[in-house]
Every structure is written in structure tokens, then in C-alpha cells.
Image: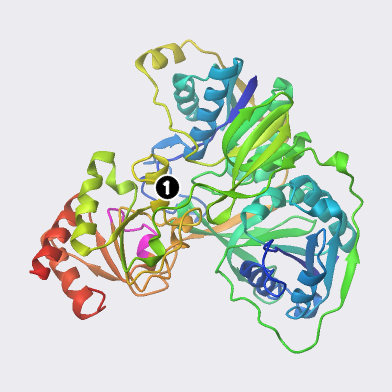
């Protein structure tokens, strides 16, 4: 099975969030970047399928130079090769624009399966996988926890709301967006990290794949959320705040 | 182009007068902010939509369209995409408003793409100034930021709204909206996916909804071997131990202790969130709690927005101190 996993590099979850001077994005200078967590689960699912059935896992990511480290990280975990769409202008492309870039590369590779995380931890749009399927004319399923190969294609376990699940059968090629938690993530081994340095990462220029069309949705202004209720912030040493909190929970909130 | 379509989601298997998911009434309310309520057309899709459509007609002020076809139940993305695509082409609305459910997330991005547009998803607020196109607010960075989005496309504008963000519409009067039927041209060969019937995982061993006090733990715990620290607080309080999704994903606590959109919904007297940042998926499961305490290292964590009491600090230091204080108070 030839599997492409579309991954995204996102700011680290614990990174400080400071809105930049233009008010359109966050200060990038001090940010550390990491692999988007749902994409890590998509990669894990792909690696398990390959380990069982053979074939190839290709990681695909779009972004500036710094994205190369995240592609290497995926190669160290076991992906076979990487495709890097070099693009410095992703912020000016909407979800359709980014999906167009990915779809153009996927079409050239002609894989059996395309996996990606169900959403990114920074923009949280949760649309890229579905748009890629639409652009390629392929069937898709979202919020997938587990994938099994069948004689005619694949069978997937999809998460529904409130603790329900569903099984869906799809022919291949197909696009799946993967939900977190379906399996345990593997770590890169020392050997894996060493091997990753030898693996091929092909760079592709965004401009050659899909022209940067005018976006249909524009992020105009970022702001910090305003508090809906008045939160009492307790300060002091751990011992002091603990004592104050217990007192307040007993005499003010009457819940202890 | 004019008018607003709002897609109503049903809850299969519910009684005749309760087939509409609450979030659909909220989507209808959001749609009525984008234009005169009489210009809002509610759309119900399915194989047998008669009773659902009349439930909608009691609350809708505009018209109701039944998009009816045997292939529209059970839900399959390709059938919904093709049918709504045909309906939208025929109605040419300015806006298409949807509830931001798992099902909508599965098909709406593809319909928008088919029109060369991008869905503005999970919207929490709509602001409109006179003679200005509306601004749609949605959350970014796991709820740590709000972003204001302006549609600039020429086609219909697709918007999905977050659960709980808009007050649901109530029945305006005794009049019933007019109902018409739209029959999409779809055939079985177009639908390549084979959906199975919904099923539940093994019976849940823990019913968190009955707990008076819940101590809930998130990523701030950092390692599985630190779990006893929060367990001790739970024991001291006579509380149930719960967790946010990442803790259960990692297998540090069983799945039946997960609170949030994919786990249990709780509303205890006291909810202590230790090391939980407060992504919307978690908040929807616990924000109805009577009293919420948040302990987090990050002062900008969204959990503080719903907390009554907040402590900025490392749970590894604060929680043991709290356990001691609770024990001391009980003596």
C-alpha cells in the first residue's frame, strides 16, 4: 500500500501566544515548532498499515524551510521519504489554497491512501483533508480512529458524538482524517534518527503546483478572548493558595 | 443571489417532536442575524423528513425545504454533498449556515470547495455594522485566541456555528412555515462509502455525571507516574477522578473517565481542573459545573475563562498543597 500522510508543523502547545503588531498573527520570533498532534496519529496509523501489509509511507508538508525539521522527525519515526512544498506565503492562502497545493502533489504520486490529522492545533480549521478529497474526486471519511485493509479497499472506525462509533467501508484510493488516540504513538529511535538523515526529501516550489489565488476568507484581526465570568485569581505560595481556596470553597461557594 | 439557507441536523431515533438537534435551533438563530428572518429557509435532508420538517416549520419564520431521497439515510457524505450542491445551485443563497457538528465537519468543507469557497467553521460570534459585510469570529490556537474573519468570495458564503454560541430560536407564533420538497438527482453509484450502523463501545464502568465533586487532570500532569498526585486529592475530597482527552489517549487513565465532547458531560457541584488548558472540546463537557477551579501554569489558558477560582501555578506543587489543606480542614 502506498500511503501519503499530509502533516503540518505548528507552534508548540506551550509556546507563548503574543499577537504581532499587525494583529493578524502571533509573534513567530520566540516560537518553537512541533508536529501537529492529530497528524502524528495519522502517521502512526500509516506506519502500522505499512508494517502489516508492506508498501511505502510518504510524508508531505507545506511551509517554509523550518518545516524540514518536522519532515525529518516523521522520517525518524519510520516514514520512507518526504515531500516538502516550499512556501513562505501559506498565511495568505486559505484552506482551499493550501489543499490545492497538497492535492497537486498527491495527484503526481498516485497513492492508495491519503491520511492527515482531523485538524491543526494552531488554526483548527479541520477542513484540509476533506477539501483534498473533493479536489481529487476521492471518497473520504473523517474522525477515524482505526484503519483496516480489506479485499476491496479499507474498513475504518469513525468516532461519532457522545461516545458512539461507526464502521465505514471505502474503496481505495481514499482520503481519511485521523482522530487522536486511536493507537499509541511511537517514538523515534536513535537508529531511526540516524537513518532519517539518509532518506530522500524532495523539495517542490509552491508556485509550480498551484497559483496563489485570492482567498475567499480573510483573517482580519486577532484578539485575546474576553472573560465571560469574573474569575477570582488566587496568588501566593502553593500552601497559601491552597488554604485560601479551601476556605473560599467552604464559606463562599459552599461546595465543600 | 439572495436569501439564507440553514441546514438542520436531525437526531435519528428520537421521538417525533424532538428529532431536531438543539444546535440546529442555534444555527437557525445565527442565520436570522444575517438577514430578515423571513428570508431564512430551513433545509432538512433525509429519506423520510415529513415529521422533522413540520417540527422545524413550527419554529422557522421563513420557508422549509425537505430535501428528500432514499439515499440520504443513513448519512453518507457523497449523497449529502451532491444533494446540497444541487439545492444551493437552484436557490443561489448569499449564506449557507450549518451547525458545527461531526457530521457537518464531514461534508461542509467539500460543498464549499465545490463552489470555490471556504467554510468559515466553528463560529462563535457574528458582528455586523450597517452597510458592512458581517465579521465572523472563531477560535484559534486551541481557544487561546479569537480571530475575526471576513468573507471576500463571490459565491455563497458558508458558515458553521459552534454549539452553545447562539441562543436557540423558540417558536415565534402558532403559524407554520410553508414546506416544499426538493428531490435531488443522485444515484447509488455516486456513493462509494458504505456506512455501518452506530454502536457504542463497551458499557461505561464509571458514571461521572453522578459525581458531586470531580478532580480532572490534563496534560499538565506531564507523566503517567504523576497520576497518584491528583488521585490523592480526589480521595481526600471524596471525588471522582476524571481527565481531558490527551490523558486518556495516552492510556494514563481509562476512556470512561474522559470528560468532553467525545467523553462524558458532567455538571458536579465542584470541578477542579488541574493542568487542563481548556480546549472547547473539554469545556463543552464541564462548563455547566456549579463551581469550577482551574490550576494551570499558563495564565492565558482558556480554562480560566470559565473558572470561578483560578490559580496560576504548577499543579505538581499546588495539588499536593491542596490535598494537605483539604485533609487539614476535614480534621
Q: Tell me the quadrant of the picture where the N terminus of chain A can be found.
A: top right
Does the rendering let one see residue A86?
Answer: no
Residue at 52% x, 47% y is B201
Estimate the x, y position of residue A141 in percent, counting from the top left.
67, 41
Q: Which residues are magenta?
A: B296-304
Chosen colour scheme: rainbow
Residue nearest the observer in this picture, B9 or B197: B197
Decide if residue A85 is on the left or right side of residue B203: right
Q: Quadrant of residue B288?
A: bottom left
Q: Position of residue A108 (x, y in %)?
A: 73, 22
Give SS at disc 1. Answer: helix
Q: Give the position of the C terminus of chain A as an image quadrant.
A: bottom left
Disc 1 target residue: B255
Say if A5 sits above or below B280 in the image: above
The structure residue drawn at horizontal position 48% and vertical position 33%, both measured from the top left corner, is A40
Q: Along the horizontal axis of the image, is A130 left or right of A256?
A: right
Q: In x, y percent, where is residue B193?
A: 75, 39
Name the subunit of mark 1: B
A137 to the left or right of B134: right
**B225 displayed left or right of A139:** left
Query: Principal SS element in the magenta part?
Result: loop
Q: Position of residue B294 (x, y in %)?
A: 30, 62
Q: Is residue A159 visible?
A: yes
Density class for disc 1 (Cα within 10 Å; few <14, some 14-19, many ≥20) is: many
Residue B297 in magenta stretch: yes
Residue at x 84%, y 68% (from the top left corner): B65
Q: Residue furthest bottom?
A: B174
Is residue B331 magenta-colored?
Answer: no
Please tell me in which quadrant of the rendered image residue B223 appears: top left
Q: Number of numbered discs present?
A: 1
Amino acid at each position: 500500500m502506498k500511503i501519503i500522510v499530509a502533516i503540518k508543523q505548528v507552534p508548540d502547545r506551550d509556546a507563548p501566544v503574543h499577537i504581532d503588531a499587525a494583529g493578524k498573527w502571533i509573534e513567530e520570533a520566540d516560537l518553537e515548532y512541533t508536529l501537529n498532534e492529530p497528524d502524528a496519529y495519522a502517521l502512526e496509523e500509516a506506519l502500522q498499515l505499512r508494517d502489516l501489509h508492506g508498501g511505502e509511507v510518504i510524508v508531505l508538508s507545506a511551509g517554509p524551510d523550518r518545516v524540514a525539521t518536522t519532515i525529518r522527525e516523521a522520517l525518524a519515526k519510520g516514514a520512507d521519504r518526504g515531500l516538502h512544498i516550499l512556501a513562505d506565503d501559506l498565511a495568505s492562502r486559505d484552506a482551499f489554497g493550501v489543499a490545492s497545493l497538497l492535492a497537486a502533489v498527491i495527484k503526481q504520486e498516485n497513492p492508495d491512501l491519503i491520511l492527515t490529522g482531523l485538524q491543526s492545533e494552531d488554526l483548527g480549521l479541520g477542513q484540509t483533508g476533506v477539501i483534498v478529497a473533493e479536489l481529487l474526486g476521492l471518497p473520504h471519511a473523517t474522525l477515524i480512529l482505526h484503519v483496516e485493509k480489506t479485499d476491496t479497499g479499507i474498513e475504518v472506525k469513525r468516532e461519532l458524538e457522545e461516545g458512539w462509533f461507526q464502521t465505514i467501508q471505502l474503496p481505495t484510493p481514499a482520503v481519511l482524517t485521523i482522530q487522536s488516540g486511536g493507537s499509541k504513538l511511537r517514538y523515534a529511535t536513535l537508529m531511526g534518527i540516524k537513518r532519517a538523515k539518509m532518506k530522500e526529501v524532495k523539495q517542490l516550489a509552491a508556485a509550480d503546483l498551484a497559483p496563489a489565488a485570492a482567498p475567499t476568507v480573510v483573517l482580519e484581526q486577532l484578539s485575546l478572548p474576553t472573560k465571560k465570568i469574573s474569575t477570582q485569581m488566587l496568588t501566593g505560595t502553593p500552601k497559601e493558595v491552597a488554604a485560601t481556596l479551601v476556605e473560599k470553597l467552604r464559606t463562599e461557594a459552599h461546595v465543600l | 443571489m439572495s436569501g439564507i439557507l440553514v441546514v438542520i441536523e436531525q437526531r435519528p431515533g428520537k421521538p417525533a417532536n424532538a428529532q431536531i438537534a438543539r444546535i440546529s435551533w442555534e444555527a437557525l438563530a445565527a442565520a436570522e442575524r444575517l438577514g430578515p428572518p423571513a428570508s431564512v429557509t430551513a433545509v432538512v435532508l433525509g429519506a423520510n423528513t415529513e415529521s422533522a420538517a413540520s417540527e422545524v416549520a413550527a419554529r422557522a419564520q421563513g420557508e422549509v425545504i425537505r430535501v428528500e431521497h432514499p439515499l440520504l439515510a443513513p448519512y453518507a457524505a457523497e449523497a449529502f454533498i451532491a444533494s446540497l450542491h444541487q439545492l444551493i445551485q437552484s436557490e443561489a443563497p448569499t449564506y449557507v449556515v450549518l451547525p458545527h457538528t461531526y457530521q457537518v465537519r464531514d461534508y461542509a468543507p467539500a460543498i464549499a470547495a465545490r463552489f470555490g469557497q471556504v467554510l468559515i467553521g466553528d463560529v462563535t460570534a457574528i458582528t455586523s455594522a450597517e452597510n458592512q459585510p458581517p465579521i465572523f469570529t472563531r477560535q484559534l490556537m486551541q481557544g487561546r485566541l479569537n480571530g475575526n474573519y471576513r468573507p471576500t468570495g463571490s459565491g455563497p458564503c458558508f458558515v458553521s456555528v459552534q454549539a452553545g454560541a447562539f441562543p436557540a430560536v423558540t417558536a415565534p407564533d402558532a403559524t407554520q412555515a410553508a414546506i416544499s420538497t426538493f428531490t435531488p438527482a443522485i444515484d447509488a453509484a455516486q456513493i462509494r462509502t458504505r456506512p455501518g450502523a452506530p454502536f457504542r463501545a463497551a458499557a461505561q464502568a464509571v458514571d461521572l455525571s453522578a459525581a458531586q465533586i470531580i478532580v480532572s487532570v490534563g496534560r499538565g500532569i506531564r507523566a503517567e507516574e504523576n497520576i497518584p498526585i491528583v488521585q490523592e486529592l480526589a480521595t481526600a475530597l471524596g471525588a471522582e477522578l476524571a481527565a481531558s482527552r490527551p490523558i486518556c489517549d495516552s492510556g494514563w487513565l481509562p476512556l470512561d473517565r474522559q470528560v468532553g465532547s467525545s467523553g462524558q458531560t458532567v455538571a458536579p457541584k465542584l470541578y477542579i481542573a488541574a493542568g487542563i488548558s481548556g480546549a472547547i472540546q473539554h469545556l463543552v463537557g464541564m462548563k455547566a459545573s456549579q463551581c469550577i477551579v482551574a490550576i494551570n501554569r499558563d495564565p492565558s489558558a482558556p480554562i480560566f475563562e470559565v473558572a470561578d477560582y483560578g490559580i496560576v501555578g504548577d499543579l505538581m506543587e499546588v495539588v499536593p498543597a491542596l490535598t494537605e489543606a483539604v485533609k487539614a480542614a476535614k480534621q
